[in-house]
């Protein structure tokens, strides 16, 4: 049997083997990483915008009213005469000015 002339018959360009991997990475980027970064930026701006009088809800489900904002935590009241210190990372949401 004679081998075929003019090059290899079973091989393809190596770039074509990486195209599916690149496509999977792009889908992963646009479906997971990009929205997550946008959500982190929104959360950061929400935390930075905290001010006295804002109504917050913690990740644990406590509703409180902000009385003072410190660098890494807030002082809030959960009931009349009950003040608590809440870490900024434990704040789940802000409802500014709502009762």
Image (spheres, rainbow, N blue to C red):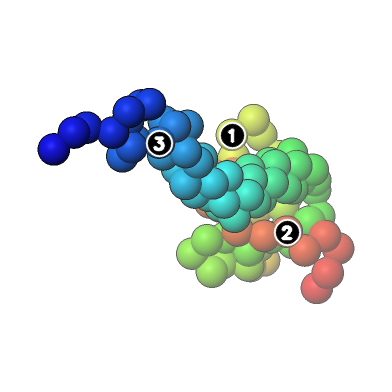
Quadrant into which the C terminus falls: bottom right
Residue 50 horizontal/vertical position (percent): 76, 46
Residue 11 horizontal/vertical position (percent): 34, 35
Residue located 75% across and 42% down the image: 45
Out of 76 and 33, give the one closest to the viewer: 33
Comparing labels 1 and 3, the label whose residue is closer to the camera:
3
Residue located 40% across and 36% down the image: 12
Give the structural element (helix, strand or loop) at label 2.
Answer: strand
Quadrant into which the N terminus falls: top left
Residue 94 badge:
2
Residue 12 badge:
3
Give the structural element (helix, strand or loop) at label 3.
Answer: loop
Compute the Cα span from label 1 to label 2: 16 Å
Out of 11 and 18, give the one closest to the viewer: 11
Instruction: Tell me where residue 21 sits by quadrant.
Output: top left
Residue located 58% across and 44% down the image: 26
* 52 sits left or right of 12 in the view: right
Residue carrying label 1: 72
Of all residues shown, which one is farthest toward the right?
97
Label whose residue precedes the other's in the sequence (1 or 3): 3
Label whose residue precedes the other's in the sequence (1 or 2): 1
Q: Quick check: can you spot residue 29? A: no
Of all residues shown, which one is farthest toward the left?
1
Comparing labels 2 and 3, the label whose residue is closer to the camera:
3
């Amino acid at each position: 049997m004679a081998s075929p002339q003019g090059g290899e018959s079973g091989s393809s360009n190596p770039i074509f083997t990486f195209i599916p991997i690149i496509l999977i990475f792009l889908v992963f980027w646009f479906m997971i990483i990009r929205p997550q970064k946008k959500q982190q930026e929104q959360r950061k701006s929400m935390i930075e915008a905290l001010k006295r009088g804002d109504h917050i809800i913690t990740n644990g489900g406590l509703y409180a009213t902000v009385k003072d904002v410190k660098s890494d935590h807030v002082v809030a009241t959960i009931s009349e005469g009950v003040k608590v210190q809440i870490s900024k990372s434990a704040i789940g949401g802000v409802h500014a000015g709502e009762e």
